[in-house]
Amino acid sequence: MNLQQLRYVLEVARQDLNISGAAIALHTSQPGVSSQIKKLEGELGVDIFVRRGKRLAGLTEAGHVVVEICGRIARELVNLKQVGSDYASPGRGTLSIATTHTQARYVLPPVLKRFVAAYPDVRLSLHQGNPNECCQMVVEGIADLAIATEAIADYPSLVMLPCYQWNRSIITPPDHPLLAEPVLSLEAVARYPIVTYDFAFTGRSQVNRAFAQRGLVPNVVLTAIDADVIKTYVALGFGVGIIASMAFDPDADRGLRAIDASHLFESATTRIGLPKNAWIRRYERDFIEWFAPQLSSKAIDAALGR
């Protein structure tokens, strides 16, 4: 048994049982991948994959366990490398963050500015997507951490670190009738076409639930994953918008008006998602604490079970 065989098994599983795809990703030959997997199966005394002729059709019961263990070993190998670089070169490395447009546009800039000043030799990467895509990037090792809201709870391989709570605003053109409402209600909002976040986006289920609890069916005419896109179409007269309050800037959005809607919707919590058993580098810990000051190094270790 060797680490190469474990990597081959793991990559075939990642490639949806496509040996050719695994061989390309591993920069080796398809026969080599097949041969090494068969050798490992022979040593273990069990089949890892279900075969239909020359094609892999699935994982055996034992195969599911083997792949899970291979994944843990691969993560620990990454941790070993990170421990070495953390102590040998504490100010060098990479930090890859998967997040939504709203976080990247409105929340992260001051944090990243501070981070770059403190760690000029750390290469930063930002990957944008909806919350599920962000979590999946961490699971697949594309990103080191995800910043999202609801989706992290759906990924048992991730540890959740709560950061801060937020709510929403209704945005309208400057002369919209909603601005004259003495107290904004969901019934009043539901009278107009609505432009809001895509169904896969942070907090959308909370918005849907609020309308449903009042027996209302909102007329959603346009959805997007980008708050700036929502604001653009509200300004064009498509309807009223429902966005995260942090995404409204009175100076930049002078052609629009915002009405606080925190009394209409349940608040949401932005969280950081980290791989379980991951080694968190010193500069990554600093980033997390600067993003959410209550998340000290001790709090991070407690969440990771250390």
Image (tube, rainbow, N blue to C red):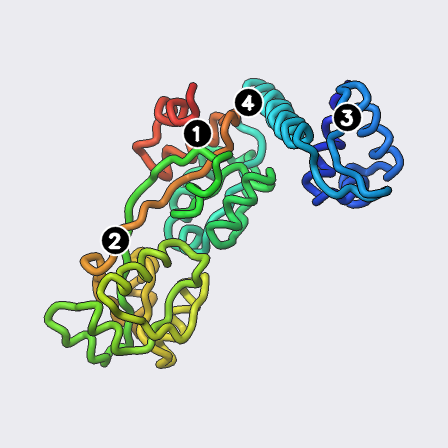
Q: How far apart are the alpha carbons under marks 2 and 1?
A: 30 Å
Q: First in sequence: mark 4 or mark 2?
A: 4
Instruction: Residue 65 in the image: state x and y as whole percent.
Output: 63, 28
Give the mark, 2 or 3, whose residue is nearer the N terminus: 3
Specify which label sits upstream in the sequence, 1 or 3.
3
Residue type indicated by callout 4: Asp
Q: What secondary structure is marked by label 4?
A: helix
Of callouts 1 and 4, the N-terminal one: 4
Crowding at dot 3, Cα within 10 Å, few <14 / some 14-19 / many 20+, comes out as: few
The residue shown at (54%, 49%) is 127
Marks 2,3: beta carbons within 8 A? no
The residue where tag 1 is placed is 285
Quarter of the image where the N terminus is located: top right
Q: Are marks 1 and 3 in contact (CB under 8 Å)?
A: no
Mark 3 lies on residue: 4
Kindly indicate whether the residue at mark 3 contacts the one at mark 4 (C-beta within 8 angstroms).
no
The location of residue 137, given as percent across then percent down, is 56, 44
Q: Residue 86: give its label.
A: 4
Q: In which quarter of the view is residue 198 placed?
A: bottom left
Where is the C terminus found, in terms of image quarters?
top left
Which numbered dot is residue 264?
A: none
Amino acid beneath label 3:
Gln
Disc 1 secondary structure class? helix
Q: Is residue 121 above or below residue 105?
A: above
Q: State yes or no: discs 2 and 1 in contact (Cβ < 8 Å).
A: no
Quadrant of residue 113 in the image? top left
CA separation in Å, label 1 and label 4:
12 Å
The answer for how far apart the CA atoms under marks 4 and 2 are is 40 Å
